[in-house]
Image: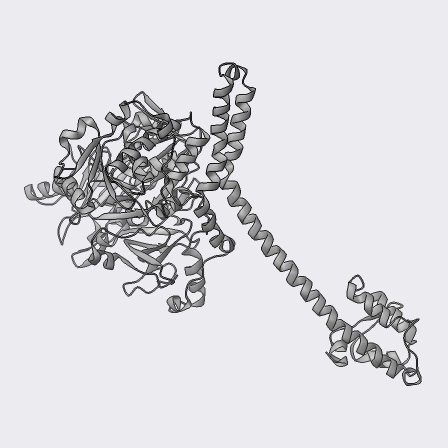
Amino acid sequence: MNIEQVVQAGLKIKEKGMVVTGASLKEQLKHSDPRTLMSIWLKNSPRKDSKANVRISKNINPDTYPHNEHLQQPEDLYKKIIHDICEDSSEIINHLESKLKLTENKISDINNKLNLAEHELIKNKHVVTVIGSVLNKLNDKHFIESKNTSDLADIISQELSAIHWSETNNTASTNNLAQKTNSQTRKLSFLQQAISNLNHHDQYLFEQFGQGPIKAIPYTCIHHAFEQQATVQPNAIAAEYLGQSISYQALNHQANRLAMLLKKQGVKKGDNVALFLERSIPMLVGIFAVLKLGAAYVPQHVGVAPEKQLKHVIKAAKTKIILTLSKLKPLIPVPAEHTCIAIDEIMQSPLNDEVADQNPQIEIQASDNCFILFTSGTTGSPNGVQVTHGNVCNIILTEPGNLGIKPGMKVAQILSIAFDMAAWEILGCLTHGATLVIRGKNIQQAVQQADVVIATPSVLGSLDVAQCHNVKVVAVAGEPCPKPLADKWAAFCKFHNSCGPTETTIVNTVQHYHKDSKALTIGKPTPNNTVYILDNNMQPCAIGEVGEMWAGGDCVTAGYLDNPELNKERYAPDPFLGNGQIMFRTRDLGRWTKNGELEHFGRVDDQVKIRGFRVELDSVSAVLEKVPSCTQAVTLKLDCRHLVAFVSPQSVDTEAAKLVIADSLPYYCVPSMIFAIDKLPKTSRGKVDKRELLKIAQQHHDQQQPEMIKETS
């Protein structure tokens, strides 16, 4: 830094209200007293409080500044002052930069400590609960009087052991957080070459819209979260079923005992165990027993799934053990060298408390399989999807997937165990300390007792909403949700519209829909997940363009069982994240809205050709659902020239429906037949049974010429 640079930088000297700057500085210095000049400089120095300025003041103090014959002229003195100021200013800058660097390091360190502290709070939150429980017992006179000293000591010791449990069972979780600590406050960066076809504005939005928040996961194994609840609140009710109930401690003890039995039968980490039964408390025992051994459970609903499918699942999953109920044993096709165990029979025998209280110590990773779910097989043979512990923990143990579930709440279990959303009901409830209300034949009865309901729109639409105002939270997924249905429920409870195939772990996008929402969408990516809208060439679509949705991040499952060709077709390297990440082709169509939410445009398979024109079936159904009193609509392709639609309930005016479509869509989108029926048929998984509807339409089409028909039967 030279003299002229200092002058031009705006060195200002105030003297008697006059400001001296720039080029006029030298002229005015010639007529100024050097001592006054230096006093003014020191008085007005912007760094007068800094440590470095103290040294400057010592160097050029008016009373001590060196005087000799070479410095008696104002011009010479000016040069000397400026030289010293510039020299020391450089040191000031270095000093300040050093302090700034230290400050930045301190801020970074504080952020890291805050993130770690937040995780420790999550990990050890039960400690406060345990201590509170202990104090309550010590203050409970009746409790104290009812126990002898030895029993009391054992009870208190058992509860306090929860603290030690946390330290020894969450090491993997802590390590996982340590790897993610620095990413808590930032977004993922997509690889530039993967989005280079977009303009700069769309590149920015593609990256911002396409990722959920980065969040740490408190557990790497889903059953560890359940075991913590059993330790913290052992007497809380874990589940209720038709007048029966089981506590968290009892459920954990039963699962531990069954796990020991399965271990003796040869079940080990990495195995698959068939869980062929129906909704019940023993179902829960079976789930956790299998998970505790590091094996994966393979669920099927006996009585709903045909024998042919059960045989296919046994063969494809290579199971050796089948868990069921005693009453269902005759319905199980048990192959040679397989063992079939009735869980309810095991539960009836006396428990060895010492053995049952010990959780199996099996080292299980987030990448190990949690369960194998077989697809419905509507497009061929059912395929087994491998869902890992990491997949499940990521959606169930973070917001919004946890649905705000907490102790004291009740969660309805109304779906088939073979459906991935049943895992959301069961594991979502029991990992957060709530009570699972398992339904019998009456769905309405279970829902009327619940705070949280997870369902398909078809199942939700079958309920009498006026009798369900006890419900606080609803989440729907599995099929498009009609807006009238969402409006009804969102009027009195928190309503989540979600989307995601089994291969992306239950759901990977969620919208909190409420009365002020501008539109019903499928929301945004869930934590640690990504969504990409791509064209047929797998290139990013511009924001607002319709394309196929691909899913990335922690939601992506481990692929199909023994089906490399299908894995290659549906799973692919993620070009946006790189680093060996995988993304999944959902076959769903969508586009980004201006506020970064996803609009769903049906399945790729639902784009059909009618009279040579491309028609999106869900778009036709969406228009039909705007017809007065229509609660749900489904549109299907009958042949290459005709569409057929079904509306519910039966009171819908089909003539009015025809006019609404004719006014809103091109002529080739108008269905040749519209049927109004009270209830649309459902599959065992709670979705609309389109095969059954197509049979009905085909029968009418064969009997008469296509025309508008109102179903009267």
Q: Quadrant of residue 91?
A: bottom right
- For the point 14% across and 53% down, the residue is 641
Q: Is residue 677 above or below residue 137?
A: below
The percent coordinates of residue 657 (x first, y second) are: 24, 42
- For the point 18% across and 47% down, the residue is 316
The percent coordinates of residue 377 (x first, y second) are: 18, 46
Examine the rendering and report whether any part of residue 460 can be seen: no
The percent coordinates of residue 713 (x first, y second) are: 14, 31
The percent coordinates of residue 363 (x first, y second) are: 37, 45
Q: Is residue 441 above or below residue 610?
A: above
Q: Is residue 653 left or right of residue 244?
A: left
Q: Nearer the viewer, residue 264 or 235?
A: 264
Examine the rendering and report whether any part of residue 309 can be seen: yes
Q: Quadrant of residue 539?
A: bottom left
In the rendered view of the protein, which quadrant contains the N terminus?
A: bottom right
**What is the residue that sits farthest to the bottom in this orientation?**
70
Q: Is residue 180 above or below residue 696?
A: below
Color encoding of the figure: one colour
Q: Nearer the viewer, residue 575 or 641?
A: 575
- For the point 59% across and 54% down, the residue is 109
How many numbered discs, if any? 0
